Amino acid sequence: MESDAVRTRTGPAVRAVGEADLGAARALLHAAFRTDPVSRWIFPEEERREERHPELFGTFLAGAHAHGTAEVTDDGEALALWFDVRGGAQRGGDELADALGRVDPGNARLAAMGELTEAGHPHEDHAYLQAIAVTPDRQGLGIGSALLRHRLAACDRQGLPAYLEASSPRSRALYERHGFAVRGAGIQLPFDGPVMWPMWREPGR
């Protein structure tokens, strides 16, 4: 994780999320994903979603901040959460799994998503993009792409592949423009849920 802001070639400066940023970062994740197809599927009742969804993404944020890479643009408009997978295991993965189990106990959809994504997760060493979020009224302006390019450039320097699960056709198309390709079959979530697309990027793409 970088301790100081680094300006991207075609976008805002990027820096590591600090302790003072965590509250705003959690709110940004909730705002950006509260209408995402997978979030709506996990919490189909809006009242429950508004209650537990911030906790879900707050847990991912805490895990990336402690064990991975959590980065934010200097204007606070975009945020990315990355985890390191080495030797077939995600760093901090057991701790994260325990914390996720406390987000909404008894939620069969959340548990099913965790099981299905874990089962399909590659074992090769890679950087795992768990989430990238942009303030809703700033989406479509290239801010998220600049943040994504920043970390992918680091992956290229390290010769490290990257992996993610796209949660909508729109995000799938975005990642394809950045060198990701669908890997294997889509993950069909149960209970009439949406499809998530596993996507892999070789370094230098």
Image (cartoon, helix red, strand yellow):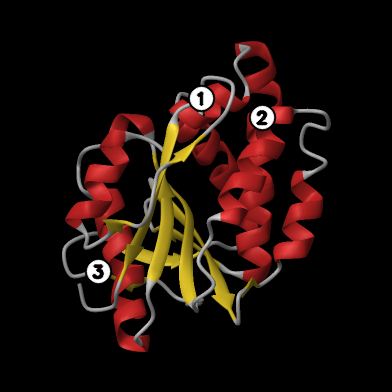
Residue at screen point 28% across, 78% down: 203
Please name the residue shown 83% across and 41% down the image. 102
Is residue 53 or residue 199 the one in the foreground?
199
The answer to whether residue 7 is above or below residue 22 is below
The mark that comes first in sequence, 3 or 2, is 3
Asked whether residue 21 is in view, the answer is no
Q: Which label's residue is closer to the chain start, 3 or 1? A: 3
Q: Residues within 10 Å of mark 1 (few under 14, many from 20)?
A: some
Q: CA distance from mark 3 to mark 2?
A: 38 Å
Within 10 Å of disc 2 (Cα), the crowding (few <14, some 14-19, many 20+) is: some
Q: Position of residue 136 (x, y in %)?
A: 36, 31
| Residue that label 1 marks | 193
Q: On residue 8, which mark appears?
A: 3
Q: CA distance from mark 1 to mark 2?
A: 9 Å
Image quadrant where residue 24 sits: top right
Q: Is residue 25 above or below residue 93?
A: above
Mark 1 touches mark 2? (CB < 8 Å)? yes
Left or right: residue 169 versus residue 53 is: left
